[in-house]
Image (cartoon, rainbow, N blue to C red):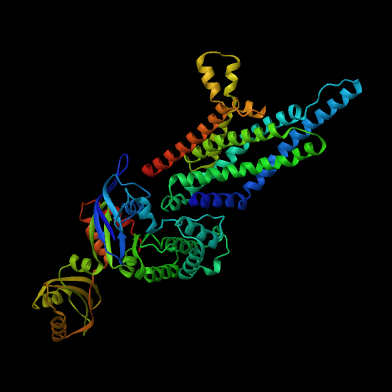
Amino acid sequence: MRNTWTICRKELGSYFVSWIAYILLTLFATAFGFFFWTLLTVFVVEGMEMQMRGQAFPMNLNEQIIRPLLMNVSVIGLFMIPLITMRLFAEEKRNGTIELLATSPVLDLEIILGKWLAALILYSSLLLLTGLNLAFLFKFGHPDWKPLAVAYLGLLLQAGALLAIGTFISTLTRNQIIAGAATFVVCLLLYVFGWVEGFESSTWAHVLAYTSVATHFDSFVRGVIDLKDAVFYLTVIILGLFFTSRSMESLRWRS
Amino acid sequence: MISVKELTKRYARTVAVDQISFEIAKGQIVGFLGPNGAGKTTTMRMLTCFLPPSAGTARVAGFDVLEQPLEVKKRIGYLPESPPIYPEMETAEYLKFVGKLKGLSGSDLQKRVEYACDRCAIADVKKKLLGKLSKGYRQRVGLAQAIIHNPDVLILDEPTAGLDPKQINETRDLIKDLAPDHTIILSTHILPEVEQTCEQVIIIHKGKLVATDSVRNLQARARGAESVLLEIAGRDGVLEAPIVQHKLEQVAGVSRVLCKQQVDSRVLIEVESEKGRLVRGDLARAVVQAGWDLNELRPAAMSLEEIFLQLTGSESGEAGKPATKELPR
């Protein structure tokens, strides 16, 4: 556990020293800010129109702003996650520092967990930024915080799963660009696999849709903790990290 | 301290290391010698548990590299061919990180970082980014990283590669300095380095063990008898090499006389004597009695380089060729 934390600290250090973290934070804040602004403007304009027409249509912050906003966050995440994970192992392989890690009295699993944890913490710090914007909603409105918390849990689980996949892909190459691009495509596909159910109803379509990370996100963003969705994400995390450890081992046999 | 038995590493098509066996006692400096691609790095990687062997066993401090890799890793300090540094880290920060990985903590860690910095003369760059250090400093940081947890065994892969002559000397001194506390294996393809730093040599070629012995024994073994170099000059400006050769051959105990070079009236002659006979005095007397000048007389110790070529070249006709080509002087 101590070693995991040592590795994690080192990874966080290099994220923040090499400016990757700040660049990601800036990009994320910009994209998120845009979505927040558009959704809020639409909400406000609609609200005023309702008032002028004298209708008392129920307006709901959670339904009309927070839910679509957090759906968007999970989409922005698709772009952020490859940028976070691509360097994890590819850089170590290129620098030759993987030899240092592999010849230190540390378990492979501790290295992998440390790196994945650091990636997850960086992603969480992106999510933390969204808190700034949402704080305004709480200042001027009364959104329900419980579904919000559940949605954030879902975002973290989803990111954890995709980060685990990205970590695995990063062990396959010493080239960060390749690792990043491959991770992006895999994440994107996992996100849109759910669409096949729209036009196809045979078994394979259901199976494919089940593997989509987006379908399992629906319940969370509606504020419902569905155990089977949580289990899905946890399974992907465990599988991703398991494949990473296999890949690290095969690295030793081959290199 | 290290015991290797029939260690083998096979890749898909090639055999990188082929049934190597050797023993290294505690506190020795051992030179691991061979041309590029001989299997030095592969062997070292197996000893450090980076690569699993295909067959055979290797034990470090009594622990098997396959069965108890964590115990082995705790006792080994390893400097790979290029120092494994993170360019975005500062020197002290990096050493602290490595120290923690190796199981140090608290004031112990602090002390070892100070110690390694002092020992490797990198105290003045503690606060510098590793990516901005010169090659010589990086190499020393690499060494500091290897000794940080005071390991029993130090494994250094070409520790002087890419350094300038001054840095090479400093690194050699540093390694000799470290010797009393650690068992050291260093690999190199530069022969004088082994002659200067190591007590014991392991020569491998094409994945096979060619020789393992002390430097002195190897030199003695390669040529059983004493060999002497003489420079002789004729007084009146003329000197016929065949005459000199003939004269020296008559000295008792001489087994072979070889004329190596002739410039004007000076000849350079190599004389080999029979085993166990000292013929230097007789040679000198014979030269003087013949009325020639004896400009120089010195024992011709066989350099490790010659031994090396002899050992690696004798295996097969073509094997010697690439080996000679890749040996820089």
Asked if residue B196 is positioned above or below residue B17 in the image, the reply reads: below
Q: Can you say whether B50 is above or below B190 in the image?
A: above
- The x, y position of residue A35, in whole percent, is 74, 33
Up/down of B244 relative to B303, above or below: below
Q: Is residue A100 visible?
A: yes
Rendering coords of residue B194 (x, y %): 32, 66
Of the pair A226 and B223, the residue shown nearer to us: A226
What residue appears at the point 71 percent right and 39 percent down from the top-left corner?
A130
Left/right placement of residue B166 relative to residue A189 reads: left
Position of residue B255 in the picture relative to residue A212 (left or right): left
Q: Nearer the viewer, residue B223 or B151?
A: B151
Q: Examine the image and state in which quarter residue B253 appears.
A: bottom left
Please state the horizontal and vertical placement of residue B43, each as a whole percent of the image.
32, 52
Left or right of A108 in this view: A79 = right
At 51% from the left and 60% from the top, the residue drawn is B96
Q: B312 or A166, which lies in front?
A: A166
Residue A90 seen in the current view: no
- The residue at the point 51 percent across, 15 percent down is A203
Residue A58: % across, % down: 81, 23
Which image quarter is the N terminus of chain B in? bottom left
Counting the numbered discs, the total is 0
Q: Quadrant of the C terminus of chain B?
A: bottom left
